[in-house]
Amino acid sequence: MAKTMKSPPAESIDAYIADFPENIQKILKTLRATIRKAAPKAEETIKYAMPTFTLDGNLIHFAAYQKHIGIYPVPTGVQGWDEALAPYVSGKGSLQLPLDKPMPLTLIDKIVKFNAKRNAEKMKAKKK
C-alpha cells in the first residue's frame, strides 16, 4: 500500500493521498482537513516523504501504513498528554492510529494547536 523507501516521494500532499485506495484516501483527506482547520496559516509540503504542515517550524507529519496512520511529532513526554495518548501505540514523538478505528480528530486538533503554540513560543524566544 504505502510507497517503499526506494520509491520517489510524492511531490505534493494531493499526490501522496492519490497513491492510496479510496477508503484510505478518505481518512487522509479528513486528517488533512482537520490539520488545516487547526492551523489555517500552516503551509503544506512533503518532508521525509510524508505530508507535512509547517508554521514556524514543523507542526505535524503524517503517513499511511498497512494497518495505521502514523502521526509525527506528538508531544510525548509532555505533562498532561499521557492520558490522551494512552489508548494508542506511541513512541518518542510518534503516534499510531489504527485504520480499523475512528480517527481521534479532536486529539489531532489538540496536537496541532499545541505544536503551533510551542513553535510560536520558540520563534518569539529566538527573536529576543
Image (cartoon, grey):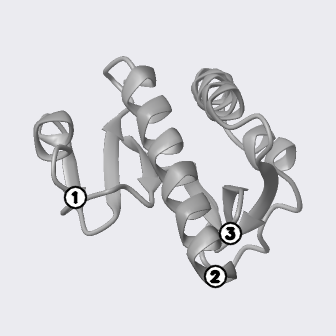
Q: Earlier in the sequence, mark 2 or mark 1?
A: 1
Left or right of 16? Residue 107 is left
Residue kind at label 1, given as amino acid type? Val
The CA span between labels 1 and 3 is: 27 Å
- Image disc number at residue 49: 3
Q: Residues within 10 Å of mark 1 (few under 14, many from 20)?
A: few
Describe the element under mark 2 as helix, strand or loop.
Answer: loop
Image vertical order of residue 22 relative to residue 78, above or below: above
Q: Which of pointers 1 and 3 lies earlier in the amino acid sequence?
A: 3
| Secondary structure state at the residue bearing disc 1 | loop
Q: Secondary structure at mark 3?
A: loop
From the image, tell me which residue sits under label 1: 78
Q: Residues within 10 Å of mark 2 (few under 14, many from 20)?
A: few
Q: Which mark is residue 116?
A: none
Q: Is residue 112 left or right of residue 81?
A: right
Q: Residue type at mark 3: give it.
A: Ala
Do the residues bearing badges 3 and 2 touch, measured as CB atoms within 8 Å?
no
Position in image of residue 119 (x %, y %): 57, 62
Look at mark 2 in the image and give the residue it sits on: 128
Q: Name the mark nearer the viewer: 2 or 1.
A: 2
Residue in view at x 57 percent, y 50 percent: 116
Instruction: Specify which label sits upstream in the sequence, 3 or 2.
Output: 3
Q: Quadrant of residue 3?
A: bottom right
